[in-house]
Amino acid sequence: MRNSNLAVSQNSTVPLTGIAVRRQCRSGAFDGHTAGLAPGYVQGNLAILPKDWAEDFLRFCQANPKPCPLLGVSDPGKYELPKLGADLDIRADLPGYRVWKNGEIAGEPRDLLSIWRDDLVSFVIGCSFSFEEALLQSGVPVRHIERSTNVPMYRTNISTQAAGRFHGPMVVSMRPLKPHDAIRAIQITTRLPAVHGAPVHLGFPGEIGIQDLAKPDYGDPVPVEAGELPVFWACGVTPQAAIAAARPPFAITHSPGKMLVTDLKNTELALF
Amino acid sequence: MRNSNLAVSQNSTVPLTGIAVRRQCRSGAFDGHTAGLAPGYVQGNLAILPKDWAEDFLRFCQANPKPCPLLGVSDPGKYELPKLGADLDIRADLPGYRVWKNGEIAGEPRDLLSIWRDDLVSFVIGCSFSFEEALLQSGVPVRHIERSTNVPMYRTNISTQAAGRFHGPMVVSMRPLKPHDAIRAIQITTRLPAVHGAPVHLGFPGEIGIQDLAKPDYGDPVPVEAGELPVFWACGVTPQAAIAAARPPFAITHSPGKMLVTDLKNTELALF
């Protein structure tokens, strides 16, 4: 682990760009969480699978676009993703990685240089950071950001559509909102299908298999106040849960909270 | 009153057009409710005010576009509205009218030919029939249509923005929907600001001053089932309530349920 856990620009009044964050990851200067870094730039979840598993996984993402909206897929063995970033090297440009063997976490390397293989296919999947930025810019408050905690996430009774060996429950994230803000949030996120799009549910957690909002399966709980509706979005943890369930002999994901920061702008993702 | 209360086309397998309905109103062949007539054509609420009140009313509609979305405004004394319909005569092309004196109902004439004045300005205001058609076409069920009753409407604690002598509470209509359908309905009606647009509230009737959903102020109650959210849209009854409150010496509206059927198509109203 490096000492640094905060990326900083040379001139601290200028926000970082996507490529600046990737450069600091690659050089070893930064290995922290990417939330709030490089405002305006799209961040993505990463999943890397060997080619013989990647074909099923691609179909899984295609069949489940709300939890698994694909921003980019590499050619086998290629560590570039030129549509997502200039001079991007998926092996080193994230702050941290997680290696999976047979569905179990087998390591948290700082880069993939020594374990890269010619059969690996990289999938970059949209992330809620993009729509949370859009919510905040529209004046819709986001409770877990106000509290500086992780968003609460829950396994649901909504099944993903299975594809080959990949299957499992949809994981959702929850944000409590007043009705007026919930309506606005539905409008805003409808415009952003590349980053999970509109909510999948609001109002009745039990109907989607969530027994206790205070006990999320991932992340931290947040209070739901009187007069607020819990609003649920499909979550990018869903594909990680599918990888854990499918138990491929080898897979790589980003380390939680340590996303790929791309050169795409969040504003470019809006449908209209 | 005429004997007929159902408009019919010469060939009953062909749905009526907007102009065909207006012709039957003008000839006296039809004086019934317009719900379900001329599918695909925009229907509108009517309000007619003398010029010295019309200026305030225009500002009232402009300031309150969700309950009072203006589809068209006539020149003073003109009974044509060419953008809304070919050869349209606002004095005779609706199935029935209501005359108001000092905020009280003073009559329900079949046409306005004998009472027309050169200072009258006609306002045509979007109506929920247009968005209900869009909901049904997208597979979102509409409870009061299934039950063949009028939509339940409620006076709220949401104030309209006053303009001159016009003021009063926003009136809303309510449709109970399952969460998935509520999300879809928000998306669909967001596209249709000319006919009330997105809901103004969902989930907590008490927060907008509605104590008992079973006792609507206008229309008929509908059951809200377990697992359904009550969803509230701004309603075209709001301007009638504002006229009743402002008590102009003379005003005319359509008779309830007897709307102006225009030549516009509902599909033309969608923003995107």
Image (cartoon, coloured by chain):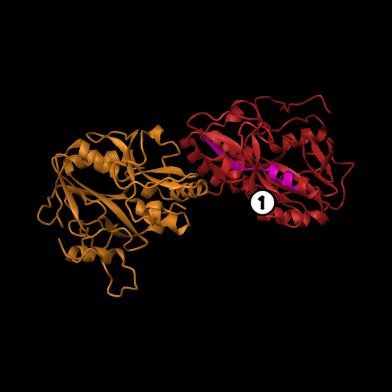
Chain colours: A red, B orange
For residue B268, say whether it is visible.
Answer: no
Q: Is residue B73 magenta?
A: no
Residue drawn at x 34%, y 72% as measured from the top left: B14
Along the viewing direction, whichever of A169 and B10 lies nearer the viewer:
A169
Residue drawn at x 44%, y 36% as measured from the top left: B204
Residue drawn at x 17%, y 37% as measured from the top left: B247
What is the chain letter for disc 1? A
In which quadrant of the rendered image does the N terminus of chain A lie? top right
Question: In this rendering, would B79 be left or right of A160?
Answer: left
Figure check: B90 above or below B57: below
Residue drawn at x 20%, y 36% as measured from the top left: B246
Query: Splitting the image into 4 quarters, where does residue B173 fall?
Result: top left
Q: Is residue A234 magenta?
A: yes
Query: Splitting the image into 4 quarters, where does residue A11 fall?
Result: top right
* Label 1 secondary element: loop
For residue A160, say whether it is visible.
Answer: yes
Figure check: B207 above or below B19: above
Q: Amino acid at mark 1?
A: Thr
Q: Position of residue B202 (x, y in %)?
A: 44, 40
Along the viewing direction, whichever of A198 and A153 lies nearer the viewer:
A153
Query: Splitting the image into 4 quarters, where does residue A19 fall?
Result: top right
Residue occupied by mark 1: A160
Q: Residue furthest bottom?
A: B11
Question: In this rendering, would B80 be left or right of B40?
Answer: left
Q: Position of residue A92 (x, y in %)?
A: 81, 39
How dense is the environment of label 1, judged by Cα within 10 Å: few (below 14), some, or many (20 and up)?
many
Range of the magenta residues?
A: A229-242
Q: Position of residue B211 (x, y in %)?
A: 36, 34
